[in-house]
Image (spheres, helix red, strand yellow):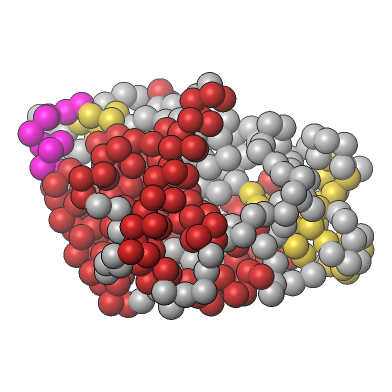
Amino acid sequence: MSAPLPTERRPGHPFDPPAGLAELREHRPLSRLAYPDGHEGWLVTSHALVREVLADPRFSVRPDLRHLPVPGAPGSDRPPPPGMFGGMDAPEHTRYRRLLTGKFTVRRMRLLSERVSLITEEHLAAMERQGGPVDLVTALAQPIPAQLICELLGVPYQDRARFQQHALDLFRLNAPPEELAAAYGAVHAFIQELVTAKRADPTDDLLSDLTGTDLTEEELVNIGFLLLGAGLDTTANMLALGVFALLTHPDQLAALRADPGLAERAVEELLRYASIIPFTVRTALTDVELNGEVIKAGESVTVSVPAANRDPAHFTDPDTLDLSRRAGGHVAFGHGAHQCLGQQLARVELQVALPALVGRFPGLRLAVPAEDVPLRTDMLIYGVHRLPVTWGA
């Protein structure tokens, strides 16, 4: 018998997956799922099955084929436009992915690491001058990835404030449709101008590199838009939610403060423990046998990332935050051909910003009770709307 996707989280447990997922994972890791549009599909909750589905090319990522498991989620009845490779299957996806993978070079990531350190220091200094309390989302979590995306795409310095504001407007909660449409149009037009400028006068950035390929202008604009969306809201929410987790686990906060070299493991554990992507969806292109069941062609399969990242069959004591854990194998960045292209950039941002923040402010703490921190339970990317923090005596 099918049931809707569990989405309710237990009060006082903001980092745990929605209630009901653990029971399904234990007893029915592949279960029938009732979709809001009437579709009868599937839900996958175990770590092993999640990786199996995400690695199987018989499951499509195309938005025009899938059904979405929550009401109100933005869908599409058309294939993705040229350049929007995140919603494409092979061979189209492979072509774009191959072009882009080489652009995320070790050299570029190392240079960006230096920039992350400088950007982080600038915002921490501004926080210190202002004094607490501050909203860490707007003071630190959003500006760092926003500035890095600007540098990655080669947005001229004088245009960055305007570009970042338009970009952040795209992710505002409950923004009127006309304002969202205006923000979308502004960002799209801005990237269009940027592509034209890079073709005429290339600089040392990813977008300039791509103008030297056989990509059309439409493809370049859409790739720029896709990278913006993928690299801004996700990293901002993971940074804020990660700090929230540390502030509510003082022993782990103290461990990171005492040993900044723990940052690499800490980031992987926070990605696992506080998964910000609640689900991803694939659709069977043909009949597929999985875990003793037959998923028929055309049926959508919802993959629960938080449930997989808390699977005791893969992670010992998975409901405990342990920064010393080797959390390899988590699926916070997905798995298979569509694993997040910018995952190394996200890691750099988190590995630099988290120890810098907790080291700069030894007295860092929440400025409100933990239960009063507003959670993004109504958004497709989980996190916090605001994170009021303070420090000092």
Q: Is residue 255 left or right of residue 37?
A: left
Q: How many marks?
A: 0
Q: Would you place residue 238 above or below residue 290 in this image?
A: above
Whether 131 is among the magenta residues is yes
Query: Between 382 and 112, which is closer to the camera in this rendering?
Result: 112
Residue drawn at x 83%, y 35% as measured from the top left: 37
Tell me, yes or no, if residue 181 can be seen here. yes
Is 348 within the magenta? no
Q: Is residue 347 left or right of residue 90?
A: left
Place residue 211 in its image quadrant. Answer: bottom left
Name the residue rendered at 41%, 74% in the picture: 212
Q: Quadrant of the N terminus?
A: top right
In the rendered image, the residue lying farthest to the front is 200
**Residue nearest the viewer, comparing 174 with 206:** 206
Q: Which is the main secondary structure of the residues drawn in magenta?
A: helix
Q: Where's residue 86, x and y in %? A: 60, 59
Find residue 113 and report its horizontal and vertical position in percent: 24, 65
Q: Is residue 116 above or below residue 110?
A: above
Q: Which residues are magenta?
A: 124-133
User: Does 63 sit left or right of 142 as displayed?
Assistant: right
Name of the residue lying farthest toward the left: 129
Q: On the image, which quarter does residue 289 sit in?
A: bottom right
Q: Residue at x 49, y 25 (%)?
A: 179
**Residue 377 seen in this snapshot:** no
| Residue 196 position in % (x across, y down) | 39, 57
Q: Quadrant of the C terminus?
A: top left
